[in-house]
Amino acid sequence: MLVIFKLLGSLALLMFGMKTMSEALQKMAGPQLRHVLGAMTTNRFTGMLTGTLVTASVQSSTATTVMTVSFVNAGLLTLAQAISVIMGANIGTTLTAWIMSAGMSFDVSSLSYPAFFIGIILIYQKRYRYIGDFLFGIAFLIFALAVLRQTGQDMHLGENQTVLHFFASFDPNSFLTTLIFLLLGGILTFCVQSSAAVMAITMILCSSGALPIYQGIALVMGENIGTTVTSNLAAMSANTQARRAALAHMFFNVFGVFWILFIFRPFIDMVCGWVGYDVDMTKEAAGATAFLANAAKLSFVLAAFHTTFNVANTFILIWFIPQIEKFVCWVIKPKKVDEEEDFRLHFITAGFMKTPELSVLEAQKEIQSFSERMQRMFGMVRELLTLSSSSSNKNDNKAGDFNKLFTRIEKYEGISDNMELEIAKYLDSVSDAHLSDDTKAKIRAMLREISELESIGDACYNMARTISRKYNGKEDHFTDKQYDHLHQMMELTDQSLSQMNRLMGGRKESFDVNRTFNIEHEINNYRNQLKSQNINDINNHQYTYAVGTIYMDLINECEKLGDYVVNVVEARMGMRQKEA
């Protein structure tokens, strides 16, 4: 029982070490990695190379995939470019297998102690704490591999008759045996939610001589499929492009397993020849010592197969990216329900995110979507005003169009309330994690942004209600001059919203914030001018006081909306809020 708990505990430590190391790397280089990913995907080959380098850097293919999908959703990458990056991520993730094979083959436990010592010193120094986190992750990883290696030796699996008889019960020359272990590898990876943990178990079984190499490699192939099942299930609640990218990832691995099965043994024998492993050696013929020394090379065989398989599969499929794109688009069609009319967070998905730093990136994309939705809502208000201007000859069709549009605006107002609550709840849960100071500041700014965006939604709804009250009431109609002034004020407000969305979708370094402030001044000046003119027009009996009040309510609401836009821009630019 003690040995089993040591095995389970060391596997848990291995998974925790990899997670800690990956998160620390993303904290240190997250923004730079995102910029590299966005810039170095001009064609399928640079995309593949970028995916390889980024994944090897952060030791997480999930992190690379998530960043890639978010860029597709934002329109910064095409689905074809994303597929090339995901192919590269499959190659980059094989570095983990090489690290593990080295840990399984040599006693590296002594390296973990100085890493722990230096790491704890750096963690308490604010400037270098992410380097300390990284060293702690590396130390946990090395220590876990050392414990796994020792535990595998202590279990004497190569001499355990029960284990040997179990694996011997499968015909090594049977194609069915390969399929069984392939399925077993996929199920184990899906259950454990970590291909690294299953790879470690496979290495222990193979290195001890208990598991033949062919069955061990079948397990590794199953791990490749099992890890994509997890991402596909996680993407089920995501939008269309995210599900297509996840399906492309699964197609890549399933296709690779499919063709490798036709040349299974020759391919493995080739890899074994590269590493220097004798496939035909038996314990009876060579002796226990020579047999175990030969078996010790199996961890490198597994790592070499993992890399060779993914490189060869990428080399085959990279020429067919347009066809893969067409296939996944054919399988996963856009939902018939209009996603704009259906409240659902498009980027934030339960279980899809793995690290707080990437969670913040997804929240930013969600806020960008929120911002664009609010401009569309304002566009509906402008359309509602246009419909109301032709109310002098109301008929059933026009009244139906007016009421339908007003109902749609009401729905958008409810959506804006829900989006604010859901994004705030998500950011609150992310803020509980260990974050960098820069990320904490971003979260504070994002909370301010969503509050102001929700206020924009309220302002739009207030204008729609005012227009509806005017349309359905008994008051006189606005004069042509009033309609002209309202449309001009709304045009200025829409320009302000366009500037805001330009900032939300781009980089703040290249954004001219003065343009937003200038539009705000124009709105304020125009409001003051119309306010004075409104008093004169009422005194001159050009329209009634009631009509003038409704007219100025709309003008003032536009001015308030412009203030909310400025607040969003200031929050994104990192500027302090002005006192009222």
Image (tube, grey):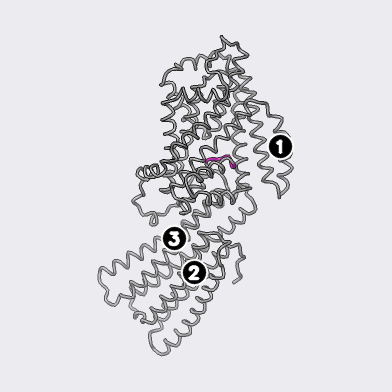
Q: Picture coordinates of residue 555 (x, y %)?
A: 45, 76
Answer with mark 1 or mark 2, whichever residue precedes in sequence: 1
Q: Residue furthest bottom?
A: 540
The answer to whether residue 395 is left or right of residue 94 is left
Q: Which residue is mark 3?
A: 373
Question: Who comes first in sequence, dot 2 or dot 3?
Answer: 3
* For residue 502, above or below residue 295: below
Callout 3: 10 Å neighbours few (<14), some, many (20+)? some
Q: Quadrant of the N terminus?
A: top right
Instruction: Find disc 2 in the rendering and name its residue.
Output: 496
Q: Is residue 348 above or below residue 209?
A: below
Looking at the rendering, the stretch of residues picked out in magenta corresponds to: 57-61
Q: Which mark is residue 334?
A: none
* Image location of residue 486, percent across then percent down: 41, 76
- Which kind of residue does numbered mark 3 sit on? Arg
Tell me residue 518's x, y (percent). 54, 74
Say how many tags the image has: 3
Q: Tag 3, which secondary structure?
A: helix
Point out residue 222 in the picture as x, y percentages from the top left corner.
Answer: 47, 29
CA gap, disc 2 and disc 3: 14 Å
Q: In the image shown, does 231 or 280 lie closer to the viewer?
A: 280
- Residue at 45% in and 85% down: 533
As drawn, 234 above or below 423:
above
- Between disc 3 and disc 1, whose residue precedes? 1
Label 2 crowd (10 A; few <14 / some 14-19 / many >=20)? many
Q: What's under tag 2, amino acid-wise?
A: Ser
At horizontal 59% and vertical 49% (from top left) the residue drawn is 30
* Location of the C terminus (image quadrant): bottom right
On the image, numbered disc 1 is attached to which residue?
116
Disc 1 and disc 2: Cα gap in Å?
53 Å
